Image (tube, rainbow, N blue to C red):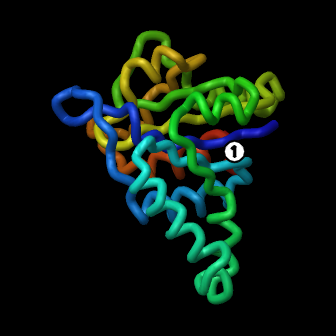
Amino acid sequence: MKLSVALIHYPVLNRNGDIIASAVTNLDIHDIARACRTYGVHRYYIVTPNRQQQDLVRELTAHWTSGPGARTNPDRKEALELVRLAGSLEEIKAELCSPALYATTASYTDNCLEWAELRKKIEMEEENNILLLFGTASGLAKSVLMESNSTLCPISGPTPYRHLSVRSAVAVGLDRLLGNWRT
């Protein structure tokens, strides 16, 4: 089974529901890479069409994979070696040879797939090539949700509040899918 994660910066929504390109953040690069490495994720893609944002990702990852950071923190190097840049979701789909797409959202959608159901598919090896899509800003644009094989039900706790940082959502989601625990 090959599971990859994509952090989508475009197309995503702003608070007004407009489609935007959001900014890449240093913490998302590092923390999500570390979560991906911990759970054995194949690749961690950062999707942005913005050339300046791509340059920022290249500069930050180079520092930790081949620059001074690589020598001082080999664990960080190992995690950041998972990072790949893409200008669009289409680029990733081509590279991964048409993976099954599972989108995440903080809002309930019709027929959302429970995380436990996807975990069972992974355990039974029903899906061999999976790409989990996480959106920045106020979430993935409807076009991305529509393109997905399924939308996962929102991560929620005992309260109606569902405003996790994307870093937290990725970590919780990966633990639900790949964590070494039993229900």
Q: Is residue 46 above or below residue 147?
A: below
Quarter of the image that includes the N terminus: top right
Number of residues whose C-alpha sits closer than 10 Å to that of mark 1, classed few (under 14), some (14–19) or many (20 or more): some
**Residue 146 placement (x, y as % from top left):** 47, 14
- Dot 1 lies on which element? helix
Q: Quadrant of the C terminus?
A: top right
Give residue 80's position: percent from left, percent from top: 62, 65
Q: Which residue is mark 1?
A: 178
Q: Is residue 96 left or right of residue 142?
A: right
Residue 96's place in the image compared with 136, above or below, is above
Q: Position of residue 169 (x, y in %)?
A: 46, 46
Q: Residue furthest left?
A: 16
Q: Residue at x 38, y 19 (%)?
A: 142
Report whether 102 appears left or right of 153: right
Closer-to-camera residue (92/105): 92
Can the viewer see residue 159?
no
At x 47%, y 31%, the residue is 104
